[in-house]
Amino acid sequence: MFETYDPYGYSLESFLPYGMGALTTFLKQHNYYVEQEDLVIKFNYPNKASSITSIFKNNIDLDISGNIREIRSFFESGEIEGDLGSFLDKILNSIPMEGFNIIGFSIYTFYHFLFALMLSKRIKQKTGIPIVFGGPFINLYGCLYPDAFNSIDYMIVGDGRVPLLKLIDYLQGKTGISEIPNLIYKDNGKVATNPREYYPIEDIPIPDFEGLPMHLYKRPQFGYIYTTILPYQISRNCTGRCSFCNYKNVNRPIEFKSYDKVINELMQMKERYKSKRFYFCDDTINNSYEYLEGLCNLFIKHKLDIEWYVFAKVGNLDKHILKKMKMAGCQWLFFGVESGSDRILKMMNKGFTSEQAAATLKDSYEAGLQNCVYFIAGYLSETQEDINQTLKFIKKNRKYIHLIFIFEFSLEYGSEIYFNFEKHGITNLYPTPSRVIFAFDESGGLKWEQKHKQQEHSKRQIIRAMRIFRVFPLNWRMYLGILFRFIIVRVYRLRHII
Ligand code: SF4
């Protein structure tokens, strides 16, 4: 099984692959032999083999830049040309594949998808082993790529444990293909989709990271110079209904793991992987105030002695719960504040005002937590006045913000805006090559080219404000971590060159 992570994703690059680890445990429990590889941690650190991201961002400065023409051509025609074939072979030759009955890729972003597609095409040409794609990207967007079946055999959407097991049964002739839930496949030249089933979060087993190069996951992160962050999921889904978010595409009731399961598994992981730092990969930790308080009480009662980092929503966090979270080991909270303009927040359906966001950041800071805040630049119909409100928000709350991330607004397939674009003041949607993101014209406003420029302008202003206000980063350990990482990467590369 291969995990393909976004080489540029700040958070994903150095995190252990939770989904693949849980699948590995599940298959082993059913007496199958499993080997797992994290291709990005293996090849991208420090060689940056997966620099496809940069090519599509027109930001080409990495090793594979000589292959741009071939990669673009592969995306358009599906043919692997020129040097690209030998580049992929180099990767494949280092991974033993003989004797395996099936190969799975867990995919997070479009760039992983493209890279995995190219590798799969090569694997098929060389070995003919059946290939299945799964993971968050396939769950949301797999249906947009029927032509992927020129390189692979199957896609699984949603929780892949039971479907993968049944797919293996099918390959052994024990069941029919129509009996495999959540499967997309090609049947007599047509793409077929089997009915969807859902499985409780409580049944997800503790992840098994055996075989992964654990030393490479020890990285400078969250202000620590050298540490391993263990991923763990406590709950599933989100009560939020943000217009730009495509999670509603898979909208389901909120699910929580039982307290016993969470406590036992965290203790086991801490012991097994010798790290007390966890990233809780939930959509948001505070879907239920009561559940969160009960969880923190147990972390404190059991003296779990762990440190954790998690996304949270502005809304139901008060001083009491924030102090309790700190006592229970919470270090960082990540908030999608998105804008300092109440008009934009309302359009986004965020469910809070800028004043409420400011109050939560202050309470969190006073409880001893560090706040990372996300902003979206160039949202629909954003004006200079809206941008000024965001700049004012950053300036006013700079004491309470430890880290900022800014993204230009992107209109994604599956979001509420996508389905009701006219309601959101959009006249035209234009698909981009990725098929996931759409360009658009604003009704009575900016055409896409102008809008794109406006987004860049908005982003630049926020970045400038961050520099001026010196919000990024306040934490001295973060400075040290970045410096340390810089030195290590340089030394590592030097060794490779020599
Ligand atoms: S709070 Fe986050 S996960 Fe929930 S709907 Fe909004 S953007 Fe999506």
Image: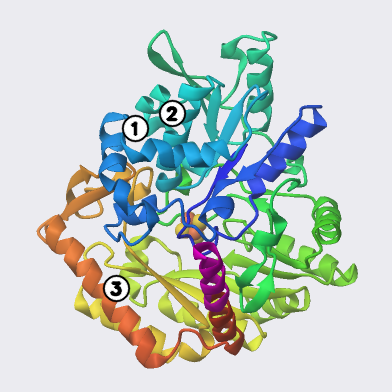
**Which residue is disc 1 drawn over?**
80
Query: Looking at the picture, which amino acid does disc 1 mark?
Result: Ile
Q: Main secondary structure of the magenta part?
A: helix
Badge 2 crowding class, 10 Å Cα cut-off, few under 14, some 14 to 19, many 20 or more, is many
**Residue 84 place in picture, x, y as percent:** 36, 40
At 71% from the left and 42% from the top, the residue drawn is 22
Q: How many marks?
A: 3
Q: Residue furthest right?
A: 302
- In the displayed structure image, the side of residue 53 where residue 261 appears, left or right: right
Residue 290: tell me if it is visible. yes
Question: Could you say whether the residue bearing mark 1 is in a helix, strand or loop?
Answer: loop
**Residue 168 place in picture, x, y as percent:** 66, 20
**Residue 72 place in picture, x, y as percent:** 27, 41
- In the displayed structure image, the side of residue 125 where residue 80 appears, left or right: left
At 72% from the left and 78% from the top, the residue drawn is 326
Between label 3 and label 1, give the one nearer the viewer: 1
Disc on res. 121: 2
Where on the picture, by quarter, is residue 145? top left
Disc on res. 459: 3
**Residue 273 place in picture, x, y as percent:** 80, 58
**Magenta span contains residue 175:** no
At 81% from the left and 27% from the top, the residue drawn is 31
Question: Could you say whether the residue bearing mark 3 is in a helix, strand or loop?
Answer: helix
From which residue to which does the magenta span run? 486-498
Where on the picture, by quarter, is residue 201? top right
Q: Verify CB contact (< 8 Å) between mark 2 and mark 1.
A: yes
Query: Looking at the picture, which amino acid does disc 2 mark?
Result: Lys
**Colour style of the rendered protein structure:** rainbow
Mark closer to the chain start, 3 or 2: 2
Where on the picture, by quarter, is residue 393? bottom left
Residue 382: tell me if it is visible. no
| Front position in the image: 64 or 25 | 64
